[in-house]
Amino acid sequence: MITLFKNGKIHTMENADFIATAFIVDQNKFVYVGDKDGALEFIKEKADEIKEVDLKGRLVLPGFNDSHMHFLHYAKNQRNVNLVGAKSIMELRLRIVEGIKSRDVGNCSWLIGEGWNHDYFTDEKRFPTKFDLDDITDDIPLLIMRACFHVGVLNSAGLKELGLNRETAVKYGDLIELLPSGEPNGVIKESLLDNVKTKISPISMETLKNILIDAQKKASAQGLTSVQSDDFGYIQDNDYNMLFQAFKELKISDNLNIRIGEQCLFDDRFKVEKFFDKGYGYGFGTDKYRVNCVKILSDGSLGARTAAMRNPYADDPGTKGIGMFSQDELNKLVLTSHSHGCPVAIHAIGDKALEMSLDAIEYSKKARPDLELRHGIVHCQITDDALLERIKNLNVITFVQPIFIDYDMNIVYDRVGDELADSSYAWKTMIDKKIHVSFGTDCPVESFNTMPNIYSAVTRKNITGEEKKIYLPKEKMNMYEAIRAYTYEGAYASGEEDIKGTISPGKLADFIILDRDIFNLSSNEEILDTHVLETYVDGKKVYSSL
């Protein structure tokens, strides 16, 4: 079947000036892009049945590509207790109680809640502890995770289930908070939290496939045709074989309607070696699911003060955050992936973590200069010009989340001081330096809704809160730069710019139709009112609100 889409305003994203009015899809690819007359000339000799779709002057874009998120976590968290926006520890407790009431009587399996942020508490701006949870949960093991997912809190039943006590806790150092008695207070952090998550939420193959199908429907409604996702930490015992088998079965049954690139999380080089020995590697998979890179978590989050900083936190001089590796460990981990021809994407928020990550990438490039790989930094928040110059000179790509400034603009000056705050979240500077910048949301840290992400990039304004603020207006991106970061640059980040990311002949027919021309709005506030009307993957309509 050949389909002619005509009478549209088609921003191909090949360059800022070219706007087409028609394109042709044959099977699952664009075969012609231009105007209606050229399209009719192109198909006049075709013997196949030709279908025509009138775009009615609407704006068409390549499908959005969320370059860093946690798709499986999002899929699973639809069953968890929603703690987003809780204004106090008491409200948090009440929501947990409601979550317990909604369960079957006698169900004493793990209960998980997520999304709280102590900075929003009006009573006490502190992490909850087991003492806030025990009297409402009894013998039900409970884990509640902060919005950043770098800090969690266990109740006493959960600590007991995991064997975390005075004797075992000491080996975890800063990853677990202790009372003066040496007993855990329930707060766990970073890699310890990651390990706990993989143990407490078993999932069957059928359930896995079903929740992935449900999640992709919601993603399609946001115009997402591709996601790059860190999923290994959200499946039982990091069973990536099961995850890839689920993708394979969904594709075979024609139920995988989004492209998923795995950012494969590992915390030591021996696990990485085992992964490659099993036959996985960069590009493993198909055009619907594949291995994009090895993901490395080098520090924590700014909100939790676990992002690794070169100097102490301005509002807590007793800490510089938490670095997950020594420089030697990080060097070896990056080199292991590099030597197998697989890029790394390193989570680095604090300037110390970023510096160490760039040192490790540079170390690998010098050790194996014969390999040119697109290594990247995920988040890349706290920066100065010297660090940005190193990113440029090392040809490192960045995976950024514009929506983060909605919250972070309220804390960044307090956390890191004025000088660093004024040189951070510097996306426009990155683009001006010719650094490849791709957009993501880190969902479910933030919603994967696309328009708030674009709004944040273009306006640098907050969305929540009563008072409108602008954080570093010099770092505003224009609309073309923002849309390109959400389309072409996402494809570039996964090494797939030759097959997707623009509306071009020969590329996969992934595109979306919006309800208004986002390039010609009367006010940038209209961005938040813009909606996706239809989403197509492989030329097939997978979402419609019409």
Image (cartoon, helix red, strand yellow):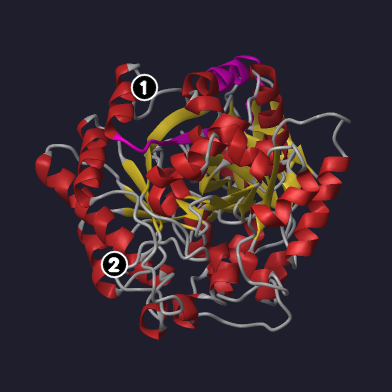
Indicate which disc, 2 or 1, sits on the residue closer to the N terminus: 1
- Is residue 310 shown above or below 48? below
**SS label for mark 2:** helix
| Kind of residue indicated by mark 2 | Leu
Label 1 sits on residue:
280
Please state, as top left, top right, bottom left or bottom right, where the C terminus lies in the image.
top right
Tell me if residue 259 can be seen.
no
> Whole-percent x and y of residue 97?
83, 49
> Whole-percent x and y of residue 284?
39, 24
Which segment is the magenta one?
A: 245-268
State the residue at coordinates (41%, 82%).
Answer: 417
State the residue at coordinates (41%, 85%).
Answer: 418
Q: Residues within 10 Å of mark 2 (few under 14, many from 20)?
A: many
> Whole-percent x and y of residue 32?
52, 37
Label 2 sits on residue:
388
Residue 438 quadrant: bottom left
Residue 226 quadrant: top right
544 drawn magenta: no
> What whole-number distance in Å separates the C-alpha atoms at marks 2 and 1?
32 Å
State the residue in front, 338 or 353. Answer: 353
Tell me if residue 379 can be seen.
yes
State the residue at coordinates (23%, 44%).
Answer: 329
State the residue at coordinates (83%, 56%).
Answer: 94
Q: Is residue 269 left or right of residue 303?
A: left
| Kind of residue indicated by mark 1 | Tyr
State the residue in front, 455 or 357. Answer: 357
Please state, as top left, top right, bottom left or bottom right, where the N terminus lies in the image.
top right
Mark identifier at residue 176: none
252 drawn magenta: yes
State the residue in front, 244 or 286. Answer: 244
